[in-house]
Image (spheres, grey):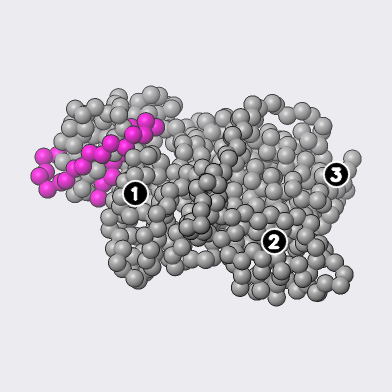
């Protein structure tokens, strides 16, 4: 029995935890909190951890180096609300282990506690009965075990982590009525259990379930003929290197070094690992960066990439056309039609969110870098994307980034025209947009994936449910009937009604719904808009 983990076992635990999570991702995705399909929790958790593990595996194999790299990289890969919470949990866990090469069960428990602390800090209003509860109760039970048995082995500790997480997960429906009503456990909590399950399999020498890996994306050749002596190179160079400090060079002072580096560029990340320093910086003068770094030692690795070439050549899900001015606008669009409309309304950067794969923190940061403005206003347009955008805003220090709590493309559609692009006061802009967003009610109409009772009303499987947040407003055999039912509930609460409909909704149904929304009131304005999103056949935007 082993009583410590080192760098190799640390990577093995993470790799098996991620592998087992990936093997059960579809099941985790299927655990819907609401009666309509909204399952991307498992996918988001897998993508988030993958970013951290990929970085950690590039290190020298020591526990401290791997833990530091994982902690710093996982936050950039966070996707969705579950990904943000998970990234902060593992950030705290790994940072706590970054100063040791052999971690005891007591060290692991302390790391779990730090992870729980950061996970709760990542959520403005923590809700019990979610993955937060699972990690907190699991860490608590693990601490109690090590306190009662100081000689506990690593294997016994992880057995307890798995047992405690399963028990906590089984109690989540008791804490969240909506889970009990839907007959499911919390999806994020299920992901935590699967991670610990994979770690236990690693320690026991068991095989993981096999999962078919997606085919690798084809490599893209850079067309250098696109560049000539008249080309504009506006993005500078991404410089990454690893310095080995050597005798005879200048003594290293981390604070002084960072100050000198800040004078040469931005997007700076420096990680000190004993007698080695890892550096990442964006600069228009990479030769000056190299000269500064070479004064302290020799380069073990060195990579310089022209970001203008990357920007021009690489495939991207972000469009950008910055018009200049004191502020820029970055939006998230879930359909090509909405992306086009946001650009027409003045959005400088439009991030495409593919179904099941929302933007990561790194995607937002890349969008921010393409719109060089003192102030950046962000419309995430999804409850899962809001915390990711906020995390990206904290990581991006070159501009004042303000994130609005838009939960749908339709809210953004109504709020964007309110922007005064001639306004120079960012506070005035924020006030107008915030007021506009708060005055919009969004109703999503989707097909129910299971029979469930909400707000005292029954929704049968395959019926359509009209939801505003977690509140059920209407039910019907068709999307239009469900939306019309919701209109009765909200009668008198709006004067403008926009109907975003996909191709499955006929023109007759659109006309019927418009009449239901006006209720014969000539002062209520309706606007039908084709949105081309079959996942949500009808979205109402009411203000």
| Magenta span includes 537 | yes
- Residues 405 and 282: in front is 282
Q: Considering only vertical position in the picture, is 422 above or below 66?
A: below
Q: Is residue 79 visible?
A: no
Q: Is residue 216 left or right of residue 365?
A: right
The stretch in magenta equals 519-543
Mark 2 lies on a secondary structure that is strand
Of the numbered discs 3 and 2, the one sitting upstream in the chain is 3
- The answer to which image quadrant residue 293 occupies is bottom right
Q: Is residue 486 left or right of residue 255?
A: left
The furthest residue to the right: 1
- Residues 3 and 240: in front is 240
Foreground: disc 3 or disc 2: 2
Mark 1 lies on a secondary structure that is helix
Foreground: disc 1 or disc 2: 2
Q: Which residue is mark 1?
A: 342
Q: How dense is the environment of label 3, judged by Cα within 10 Å: few (below 14), some, or many (20 and up)?
A: some
Where residue 328 sits in the image (x, y, percent)?
40, 61
Instruction: Report how far apart the C-alphas of labels 1 and 2 lie in the structure.
Output: 37 Å
Q: Which residue is mark 2?
A: 279
Mark 3 lies on a secondary structure that is loop
Foreground: disc 3 or disc 1: 1
The furthest residue to the front: 229
User: Residue 389 shows which numbered tag?
Assistant: none
The residue at 29%/63% (across/down) is 420
Q: Which residue is mark 3?
A: 153
Where residue 345 sits in the image (x, y, percent)?
30, 52
Q: Is residue 239 left or right of residue 65?
A: left
- Residues 266 and 131: in front is 266
């Amino acid at each position: 029995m082993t009583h410590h983990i080192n760098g190799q076992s640390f990577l093995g635990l993470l790799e098996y935890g991620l592998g087992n999570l990936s093997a059960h991702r579809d099941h985790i995705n299927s655990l819907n909190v609401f009666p309509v399909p909204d399952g991307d929790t498992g996918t988001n958790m897998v993508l988030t951890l993958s970013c951290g593990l990929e970085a950690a595996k590039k290190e020298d194999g020591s526990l401290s180096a791997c833990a530091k790299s994982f902690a710093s990289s996982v936050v950039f890969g966070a996707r969705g609300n579950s990904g943000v919470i998970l990234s902060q949990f593992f950030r705290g866990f790994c940072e706590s282990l970054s100063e040791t090469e052999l971690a005891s069960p007591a060290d692991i428990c302390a790391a779990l506690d730090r992870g729980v602390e950061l996970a709760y800090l990542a959520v403005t209003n923590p809700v019990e009965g979610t993955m937060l509860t699972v990690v907190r109760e699991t860490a608590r039970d693990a601490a109690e075990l090590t306190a009662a048995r100081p000689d506990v082995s690593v294997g016994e500790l992880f057995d307890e982590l798995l047992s405690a997480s399963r028990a906590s997960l089984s109690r989540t429906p008791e804490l969240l009525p909506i889970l009990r009503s839907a007959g499911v456990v919390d999806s994020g909590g299920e992901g935590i259990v699967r991670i610990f399950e994979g770690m236990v399999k690693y320690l026991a020498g068991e095989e993981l379930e096999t999962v078919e890996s997606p085919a690798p994306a084809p490599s893209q050749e850079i067309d250098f003929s696109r560049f000539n002596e008249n080309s504009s190179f506006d993005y500078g160079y991404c410089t990454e290197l690893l310095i080995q400090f050597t005798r005879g060079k200048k003594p290293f002072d981390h604070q002084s070094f960072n100050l000198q580096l800040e004078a040469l560029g931005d997007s700076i990340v420096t990680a000190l690992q004993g007698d080695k320093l890892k550096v990442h910086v964006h600069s228009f003068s990479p030769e000056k960066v190299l000269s500064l770094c070479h004064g302290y030692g020799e380069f073990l690795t060195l990579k310089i990439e022209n970001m203008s070439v990357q920007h021009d050549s690489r495939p991207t899900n972000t469009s950008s056309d910055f018009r200049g001015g004191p502020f820029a606008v970055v939006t998230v669009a879930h359909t090509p039609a909405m992306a086009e409309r946001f650009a027409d309304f003045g959005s400088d950067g439009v991030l495409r969110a593919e179904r099941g794969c929302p933007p990561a923190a790194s995607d937002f940061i890349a969008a921010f870098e393409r719109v060089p403005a003192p102030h950046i206003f962000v419309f995430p347009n999804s409850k899962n994307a809001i915390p990711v955008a906020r995390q990206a805003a904290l990581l991006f220090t070159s501009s004042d980034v303000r994130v609005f709590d838009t939960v749908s493309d339709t809210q953004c559609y109504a709020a964007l025209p309110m922007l005064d692009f001639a306004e120079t006061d960012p506070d005035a802009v924020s006030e107008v947009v915030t007021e506009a967003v708060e005055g919009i009610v969004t109703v999503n109409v989707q097909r129910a994936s299971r029979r469930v009772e909400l707000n005292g009303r029954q929704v049968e499987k395959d019926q359509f449910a009209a939801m505003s947040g977690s509140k059920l407003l209407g039910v019907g055999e068709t999307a239009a009937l469900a939306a019309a039912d919701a209109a009765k509930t909200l009668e008198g609460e709006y004067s403008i009604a926009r109907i975003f409909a996909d191709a499955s909704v006929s023109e007759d149904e659109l006309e019927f719904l418009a009449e239901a929304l006006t209720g014969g009131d000539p002062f209520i304005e309706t606007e039908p808009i084709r949105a081309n999103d079959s996942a949500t056949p009808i979205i109402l935007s009411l203000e």
